[in-house]
Amino acid sequence: MAGRLLFELFIFSLPFLVFGLYLLATRSAVDAGQRKWPIQLLFAIGLALATIAWFVMIALEPRDRGMCIEPERFENGVLTPARSYPCEHRPQDVGIPRPRPEAPPSDAPN
C-alpha cells in the first residue's frame, strides 16, 4: 500500500518536476545568451509521461475476471470492509442486451 501511495505521489509530482527543470534550463540558457527550450518539446514530454503513467496504473490495477468487488461503506456507525465475491453475471457478456421478457396478453386480468 505504501509503495502504491508513493508511486501515485511521484506521478502527481512529475509535471511540477518537469516545470522546475524547464525553469532551471531556461534561466541558465538566458544567462548564457542562448535560445530557450521549445514549448512543443515540453508538451510532448508531458503528454508521453501522462500516457505512460496511465498505462502503468492500468497494468498495476488488481483484477480477476470472475470476481466482483463491493467497496467498503459506513453503515449505522459501523465500517463494513470491502469484499470480493464471485460475480453472478458473465463478464464476457457485458454490452450484449438481455432478451426482454414477453408481455402478458392485454386481455388478461391484472
Image: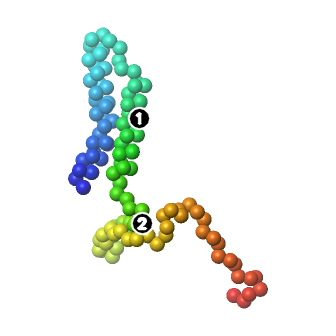
Q: Is residue 104 left or right of residue 93?
A: right
Instruction: Find residue 69 and report its image quarter.
Output: bottom left
Characterize the local packing of mark 1: few (<14), some (14-19) or many (20 or more) Cα atoms within 10 angstroms.
few
Q: Is residue 38 visible?
A: yes
Residue furthest to the left: 2
Q: What residue is drawn where x is 40% and y is 66%?
A: 67
Amino acid type assigned to the residue bearing label 1 in the image: Leu
Q: What residue is drawn where x is 30% and y is 35%?
A: 16
Residue furthest to the top: 33
Task: Pick the quarter of the image with the C terminus.
Answer: bottom right
Q: Position of residue 43 (x, y in %)?
A: 41, 30
Amino acid type assigned to the residue bearing label 2 in the image: Gly
Task: Pick the quarter of the image with the N terminus.
Answer: bottom left
Q: Position of residue 47 (x, y in %)?
A: 41, 35
Q: Nearer the viewer, mark 2 or mark 1?
A: 2
- Comparing 90 with 79, the one in front is 90
Residues under labels 2 and 1: Cα distance? 34 Å
- Comparing 93 with 101, the one in front is 93
Secondary element type, mark 2: loop
Q: Position of residue 90 (x, y in %)?
A: 49, 67
Give the labeled residue for mark 2.
Answer: 66
Give the labeled residue for mark 1.
Answer: 47
Reply above or below: 4 against 87: above
Q: What residue is drawn where x is 60% and y is 68%?
A: 98
Q: Is residue 98 left or right of residue 60?
A: right
Task: Count the numbered circles shown.
Answer: 2
